[in-house]
Amino acid sequence: MPRGTPVHAVLINSGAAIPRRIYRGFAAHLAEQGCAVLTYDYRGIGGSRPRSLRGFAASMTDWAALDITGAVNWMREHYAALPLRYVGHSFGGQTLGLLSNNTEVSRALFIASQAGYWKLMAPGERWRVVTMLNGVGVPLTHALGYTPGWSGVGEDLPKGVFLQWVRWIMSPRYLFDDASLPGLANYANFKSPVRALCLADDPWATQPAVELLCAGYTGTRPELLSIAPQDVGASAIGHIGFFRPAHRDTLWRSATKWLLAT
C-alpha cells in the first residue's frame, strides 16, 4: 500500500509456475508511486499450495476463470473509485482476454506475454522445451500425480495445470486452438489500451509469439514494444529479468509511466 491515499489500483498477475515473491520489488515500486497493489499466487502455487499436490484439482482454465477473475473482482470491490490497471507477466497477459470481467480493467501492461507455441520459441530453446515437457514432464506427472519443479518447469505444478499447458504449447495457435475454453469470446470484449513488452533476448516470448498473442485481442490494438538488453544498459533481461530491481530506473520507470497514464 502507498503511504497516503492511493490514486491507482494495480493487479499483478504471475507467469505460470512463478510465485508472487518474484514481483515483490516491482509491486513496492508501484506502491511508491501511489498505487494500491495486489500480488497473489494461483491455486496450487506458492502461498496457495496445499500440503500435497497429489489429487489436487486445478487447471489453467481455473487460474483464469476463478483466480484472476476473482482478483479483479476483489480489486473493484475494495478500490471501486480508482482506475484498475493490470500487469500480466507471461501467462498473466495471455489470459486477460479470457476473463468475464476484463472490461473492469482500464489499461493493461503485458511483460513477456506470448502465445507460447513451441515452434515460435528461440531455435535452441524449442527443442529443449519439447524434450522437457513431453519426454520428462508428462511421464513424471502421470507417475507422481503432479509436476515437480525440478523437472524444469519452475515451481511444482498441479497435474491438470501442467497437462493443459503442454496441450497449448503443442498447438500452433496456443490457447486459441482450445475449443473447450468458454472464455475465448471474451477477448473481443477487452477494448482498453494494451502495451506488450517484448524482451529481445527472451527465448520463450519471441516477437512472433508476442505478435500472435496480441492478434487475439481483437477489441483493441495492442502496442508492441521490443526492448533489447543494450537499450537499457543491461547484459541480459530474458523471460523474468524485467522484475529485477536493477531495472528500477530504466524498464520500471518507463513501464510505470505508461501504466499510470490517464
Image: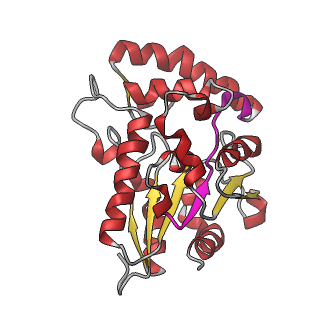
Q: Quadrant of residue 228?
A: bottom right
Question: Could you say where residue 26 lies in the image, as x and y percent from the top left?
Answer: 49, 66
**Quarter of the picture holding the N terminus:** bottom left
Q: Quadrant of residue 237?
A: bottom right
Of residues 77 and 114, the one nearer the viewer is: 77
Question: Could you say where residue 75 lies in the image, as x and y percent from the top left?
Answer: 36, 65
Of residues 211 and 153, the one nearer the viewer is: 211
* Residue at 59 percent of width and 69 percent of height: 252
Q: Is residue 258 above or below residue 170?
A: below
Q: Identify the image's colour scheme: rainbow, by chain, secondary structure or one colour.
A: secondary structure
Question: Could you say where residue 171 lies in the image, as x and y percent from the top left?
Answer: 64, 25
* Residue at 36 percent of width and 73 percent of height: 80
* Residue at 46 percent of width and 63 percent of height: 104
Question: Could you say where residue 71 lies in the image, as x and y percent from the top left?
Answer: 36, 56
**Quarter of the picture holding the C terminus:** bottom right
Q: Is residue 120 above or below residue 32?
A: above
Residue 118, magenta (yes or no): yes
| Magenta range | 105-121
Residue 73, magenta (yes or no): no
Q: Is residue 213 above or below residue 237?
A: above
Looking at the image, which residue sits at the far left? Answer: 51
Of residues 246 and 157, the one nearer the viewer is: 157
Question: Is residue 165 toward the left or the right of residue 201 in the image?
Answer: left
Q: Is residue 116 above or below residue 193?
A: above
Of residues 175 and 6, the one nearer the viewer is: 175
Q: Quadrant of residue 227?
A: bottom right
* Residue at 36 percent of width and 47 percent of height: 67
Question: Is residue 189 toward the left or the right of residue 63 in the image?
Answer: right
